[in-house]
Image: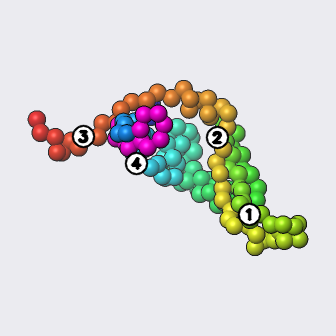
Amino acid sequence: MAIKYVKVKRMISTGQNPGEKYLARIFRGQDVMIEQIANDISGSTTVSYPDVLACLKAMEIHVAKYVTAGQAVKFGLLGAFIPSISAKAVASAEEVTAESIRRARCRFYPSAEFMRSLAKSKFELADLAVKSLVTE
């Protein structure tokens, strides 16, 4: 399976040769929902669709629970969901309080193995022709 891309025109204002340029951008297509993943897993294992879906839904709940508690959640081959915060710098340790924290977020860090497999990806130009509008 290849990663699809499209060609886009952009105005580049930095670098040695600014101006109108063309570059490749990823074409994501349709998002894959948890139900599709459950269907795929069910089709490739002996586990039924409802059981897989129940496990994946439970996983969503528990990953959110652990990350919102400040814990990293690691998925071996896939990578890790790691919580982080950004905070306001203050002059003394006494001034560091919960109010000095600006926001919390979660970052996904892919594993080294996942990054190696991504680096080996093939690419192909996406066909954006709308078949019902194409005249013969």
What is the span of residues highlighted in magenta in the rendered image? 4-18
Residue 34, compared with residue 104, is above or below; it is above
Q: Residue 111, image x and y in percent?
A: 67, 37
Residue holding disc 4:
30
Residue drawn 66% across and 56% down? 106
Camera-side mark, 4 or 3: 3
Say if the magenta span includes residue 71.
Answer: no
Numbered mark located on residue 87 in the image? 1
Residue drawn 40% across and 36% down? 23
Q: Residue 118, image x and y in percent?
A: 56, 32
Numbered mark located on residue 129 in the image? 3
Residue holding disc 2:
110
Q: Main secondary structure of the magenta part?
A: strand
Residue drawn 62% across and 34% down? 114
**Precedes in sequence: disc 3 or disc 2:** 2
What is the distance, in whole Å, between disc 3 and disc 2 at their CAs?
Answer: 33 Å
Near mark 3 (Cα within 10 A), the count class, few <14, some 14-19 or many ≥20, is few
Near mark 2 (Cα within 10 A), the count class, few <14, some 14-19 or many ≥20, is some
Residue 38, compared with residue 24, is above or below; it is below
What is the distance, in whole Å, between disc 4 and disc 1 at their CAs?
Answer: 36 Å
Residue drawn 52% across and 48% down? 38
